[in-house]
Amino acid sequence: MKYTTLLFDVDNTLLDFDANEAESFRSMLLELGETYTDEMYQTYKRINSGLWKKIEKKEISLEEVLNNRFAMLMKHYGREVDGARWEKTYRRYLNRGIQQIPCVHQVLAELKKTYRLYVITNGLEETQEFRMEHSGLSQYFSDFFISGRIGANKPSKEFFDYVKAHIPGFQQGKTLVIGDSLTSDIKGGSDAGMDTCWFTRDRQAQYEDVIPTYVIHELPDIFSVLG
């Protein structure tokens, strides 16, 4: 058996974060008495994505992102809002989002029979733990490595060093990282000396600078990788 340990990202790998994000954004605006438009949502996604890339490069802290991303969004539309208040409202909906990637329970239940499974995720500890528990996915994993708890984000060396040090009998060559983000999961795993599997539901997606060991487009495809 080539691998004994599998490290899974959460968002858009096990749980459908895109669906949760869209629903939470719409619900936040409704509660705050704002009008939803798809153009506004796409603008938010561009701003948020840029901020998370800065987190990965250690150019900005998670707290700065959470306190400012909605203020930045509305400043784009010429308005000043309480970014922290908007974040608190948004987070309340996001924390409850447990939309799942198709077949996730069947895949994890089968993998658990043979492999040691661990979660590696960026995000807030309370958010990720709540979502994993209430989606029923926590039962499959031996431990959760969450950036908000560790104090370091993927793809940093500090994050992956922590993971290695806290998995009993860790063997780098027998561990596979599985995730949807090239810049976070795949780069981090590769830099840490592990094989990687890029899970992208976009069959037209391309990669250049970061090269995964494997590519899959549906979660059950992991079985063809593992053999």
Image (cartoon, helix red, strand yellow):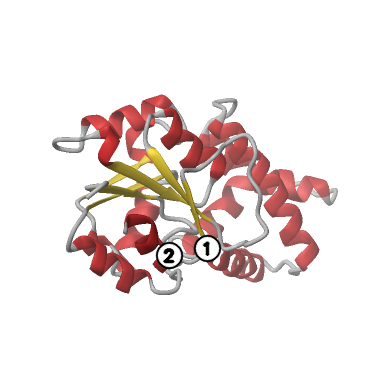
> Which residue does the image show at 37% across and 35% down from the upper left?
194
Observer able to see residue 132: yes
Q: Which residue is mark 1?
A: 217
- Residue 31, image x and y in percent? 61, 69
Q: Which residue is mark 2?
A: 221
Report the front residue among 227 and 196.
227
Task: Identify the image quadrant of residue 173.
Answer: top left
- Residue 226, image x and y in percent? 32, 56
> Which residue does the image show at 32% across and 71% down from the upper left?
105
- Pointer 1 local density, CA inside 10 Å: few below 14, some 14–19, many at least 20: some
Name the outermost residue toward the left: 169
Q: Quadrant of the C terminus?
A: bottom left
Report the front residue among 220 and 38.
220
> Which residue does the image show at 26% across and 47% down from the upper left?
3
- Residue 154, image x and y in percent? 45, 36
Disc 2 marks a residue whose amino acid type is Asp
